[in-house]
Every structure is written in structure tokens, then in C-alpha cells.
């Protein structure tokens, strides 16, 4: 920062130092100072990442998504290059004011991009600034900030230290559950314990307070201690949802894969838990890992779901998981389940005449490629705007849409249900 300030003062005073090139030398030195200062600020305080919390409210700009973040950084980098080229253009006409403005803004954007990407390795605070080394009063302030954020206070922005602690604890939980899922004896014990849970609240309690108990770090223990008051029950629930959701998704991915046994009821309950977590976190406008497309309807109660429908959802997940390009996500399954629960005449789907007469052999075609069909359904109901046409069966999506029967999504599910009945 001192070097940056020195460079700016040198440029303003007209001394180019290393760039003693008439008027442009001091201006270049001034811009380098701007670059250094903004790089240090971004590295130590993550200003742009704090601004991400505002951007994520805009659909399509969920910057916690790595792909979106990368695209944003690429746009910023290209903007910096364009401004630099513009500065060189103005310099050729000796328009020095325009030159230094373009160059300075280019340096600001470039410093922000580099600081976002690599700044953490050079911009770390000293050990005394880390969360673990804060005194009791400072930690209390940090936990108060966390509680306000979990309550949905839009004016509250988490510190970098808090974000790191949240992500670290989530990673610890995920590693813990992966370890148990990869060990046959531990897996059997975990699944048995979860199956014995009395209700959804009991299932969450087992996961958080028993399965994960030995994986709490010091930060989480403190966060729990600071949110024990009865009036802070919603804060505790939001904290549990935030930390536990990735682990719940890992369990569902495992038990819905081939050779995982008949865990239909457990998958259904975990889907309901995920839906409740999503609803809770979405109402606070918190970002979810692994949930780009949060389901619109998450109000379905576990007791409202017929066993045949639970088996159907398990079938969809199983067949989709057999596709090489599929990555498990619960949201499309929750969306399908929500739609089907809300259908009043669902019982009539078991009749052969329930399908529209103008659907010639469609269900038979689906029965021949259930893995590809369920994979395409996962893409469609997870919010993808297009259907991959590289599969032979994908033409059915367009054919069904062109029939214009009045309810495209219901037609897709009716056909899938009919195919499922043939494969049972």
C-alpha cells in the first residue's frame, strides 16, 4: 500500500521515476499506483466478493456458482483490455486526460480480477487477525453479525473470516459423511439409524447432533452457544440448514445410485428435508451449494406422498444416475414430486386410457431408453432452457410439445409414469 501511495504521489507531482517519458511517464506511474492499491484492498478485504451478495439477487448472476463467477471475471478482464486499448488510442492523439482515465479504470478492474483470483495468498492478515485468535468481545461481535445475517438482514455482510469458517465446516461435514458412506459397516449403521428416525425433525437432529457431533470445529461450537435463546430458534434452524444441506445431498446421491438397496422411504424423507432447507435458506436469500435451481414449490409434507409415488421418484433418480453425464441434484426430483402431489386425478394415471389417444407408442419408446429419458427429464425439470437433441429419444419432447394438449409438463410425467409401469 505504501508503494502504491508513493507511485500515485510521484505521478501527480510529474515525476515518472522509472517511466521518465515526457507527460505519459508520470501518468503511467500514477496508474500503476492505482493498480497496486486496488489489488491490496481486494486481496485483504475482498470488496468485490462482498458486492457479490447484491449481484446474486439478480437471476443468472449467482456468483457463488463457479461457472458464473468465471464468466464475470472474464467480462471484467476483457473490459480492462478494451479500456487499455482505448487509452493507447487516446495517447496517440496526445489526449492525456482521456488516456489516464482509461488506463486508471483498466488498472482498477484488472487489479480487482487478479485480487479476486489470487489475492488470498498474498493478502492474508497477520495471525493475530484470524478468527481463532480474536478475543472474546470480537468473537461475540462476529457471532452477532452471523445471527443478523441468518435472520435475513439485507444490510449485513459476512466478513471474509466468517465465510471461510462456514465453508470449512461444510467441507468437514461432507468429508465426514463421505467417509461413512465409503465404509460398509459405517454406512449400514448410518442408514439404519436414519431409517429409525421418528419424523423429519428427528432425522435432522440425528444427522446434526449425533452423526456430525465429533466434526464440530471451534467456530461452530461458539455459534451454537451464541444462539441458544428460545427466540433464536429460527437462527439455529438456518445455521443447521446452511451447514448440513451439502451432506444431505451426498447421502441422497449415494442411496439413489445402483446397488444401494431399497431406501425409497429414506430418499423421500431426505428430499423433503432438502426442500425445507431450501425454503428456509431461500427466504433468507442465502446461497446454496449445489442448488442453482431452487424448486418453486417446497411445501409438500412427507405424509402427503403416496408410497407408489415415492417408488417412482426413486426409479427416476436411479435411472438418471446410470447416465454417464448425470450429476446428482435433488431439485428436479422435488419439482416433479411437487407437481405430481398436486394433481387431483393422479389415481387415474394407472388406467391405460389415461394417456391421450394421439400419443402413439411414446411410452414404449421411453421404456427402451429409460436412462437417457430420465437424464433428459433431470435437465428439463432442473431449469435447463433446452433439451439436448443428441439423443434419439429427445425428439419426443418436441413432439409432445407440438401436440398442444394443454399441459406439457403433465404430459411428460404421464408418459414417464406409463413407461415406469411397464418396466416394473
Image (spheres, helix red, strand yellow):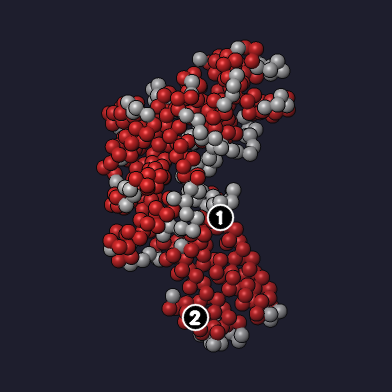
The residue at which mark 2 appears reads as 7
Q: Position of residue 270 (x, y in %)?
A: 42, 32
Instruction: Tell me if residue 319 can be seen.
Output: no
Q: Residue furthest top?
A: 352
Identify the residue at horizontal 59%, vertical 69% (top origin). Answer: 106
Q: Position of residue 91 (x, y in %)?
A: 66, 78
Foreground residue among 87 and 173: 173
Say which mark, if any, is on residue 382.
none
Instruction: Tell me if residue 414 can be seen.
Output: yes
The residue at which mark 1 appears reads as 55
Q: Nearer the viewer, mark 2 or mark 1?
A: 1
Q: Position of residue 112 (x, y in %)?
A: 51, 65
Q: Quadrant of residue 251?
A: top left
> Relative to 328, does residue 65 appear above or below in the rendering?
below
> Relative to 14, does residue 225 appear above or below in the rendering?
above
Q: Residue furthest front?
A: 231
Q: In the drawing, does residue 44 fall left or right of residue 396?
A: left
> Relative to 19, does residue 370 appear above or below in the rendering?
above
Amino acid at each position: 500500500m505504501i508503494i502504491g501511495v508513493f507511485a500515485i504521489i510521484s505521478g501527480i507531482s510529474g515525476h515518472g521515476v522509472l517511466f521518465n517519458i515526457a507527460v505519459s511517464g508520470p501518468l503511467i506511474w500514477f496508474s500503476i499506483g492505482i493498480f497496486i492499491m486496488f489489488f491490496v484492498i481486494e486481496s485483504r478485504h475482498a470488496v468485490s466478493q462482498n458486492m457479490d451478495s447484491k449481484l446474486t439477487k439478480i437471476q443468472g448472476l449467482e456468483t457463488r456458482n463457479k461457472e458464473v463467477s468465471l464468466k464475470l471475471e472474464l467480462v471484467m478482464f476483457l473490459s480492462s483490455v478494451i479500456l487499455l486499448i482505448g487509452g493507447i488510442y487516446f495517447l496517440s492523439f496526445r489526449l492525456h486526460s482521456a488516456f489516464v482515465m482509461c488506463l486508471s479504470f483498466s488498472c482498477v478492474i484488472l487489479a480487482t480480477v487478479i485480487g479476486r483470483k489470487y489475492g488470498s495468498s498474498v493478502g492474508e492478515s497477520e495471525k493475530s487477525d484470524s478468527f481463532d485468535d480474536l478475543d472474546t468481545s470480537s468473537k461475540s461481535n462476529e457471532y452477532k453479525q452471523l445471527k443478523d445475517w441468518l435472520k435475513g438482514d439485507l444490510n449485513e455482510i459476512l466478513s471474509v473470516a466468517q465465510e471461510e469458517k462456514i465453508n470449512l465446516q461444510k467441507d468437514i461435514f461432507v468429508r465426514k459423511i463421505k467417509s461413512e458412506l465409503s465404509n460398509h459397516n459405517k454406512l449400514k449403521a448410518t442408514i439404519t439409524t436414519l431409517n429409525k428416525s421418528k419424523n423429519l425433525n428427528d432425522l435432522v437432529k440425528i444427522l446434526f447432533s449425533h452423526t456430525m457431533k465429533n466434526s464440530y470445529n471451534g467456530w461452530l461450537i461458539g455459534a451454537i452457544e451464541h444462539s441458544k435463546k428460545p427466540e433464536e430458534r429460527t437462527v439455529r434452524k438456518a445455521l443447521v440448514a446452511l451447514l448440513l444441506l451439502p451432506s444431505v445431498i451426498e447421502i441422497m446421491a449415494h442411496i439413489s445410485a445402483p446397488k444401494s438397496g431399497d431406501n425409497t422411504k429414506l430418499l423421500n424423507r431426505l428430499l423433503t428435508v432438502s426442500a425445507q432447507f431450501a425454503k428456509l435458506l431461500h427466504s433468507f436469500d442465502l446461497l446454496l451449494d449445489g442448488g442453482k435451481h431452487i424448486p418453486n414449490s417446497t411445501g409438500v409434507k412427507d405424509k402427503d406422498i403416496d408410497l407408489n409415488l415415492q417408488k417412482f421418484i426413486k426409479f427416476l433418480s436411479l435411472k438418471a444416475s446410470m447416465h454417464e453425464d448425470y450429476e446428482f441434484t435433488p431439485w428436479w426430483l422435488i419439482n416433479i414430486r411437487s407437481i405430481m402431489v398436486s394433481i387431483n386425478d393422479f389415481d387415474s394415471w394407472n388406467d391405460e386410457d389415461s394417456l391421450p389417444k394421439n400419443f402413439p407408442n411414446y411410452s414404449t419408446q421411453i421404456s427402451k431408453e429409460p436412462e437417457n429419458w430420465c437424464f433428459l427429464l433431470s435437465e428439463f425439470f432442473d431449469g435447463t432452457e433446452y433439451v439436448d437433441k443428441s439423443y434419439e429419444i429427445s425428439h419426443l419432447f418436441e413432439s409432445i410439445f407440438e401436440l398442444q394438449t394443454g399441459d406439457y409438463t403433465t404430459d411428460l410425467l404421464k408418459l414417464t409414469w406409463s413407461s415406469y409401469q411397464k418396466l416394473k
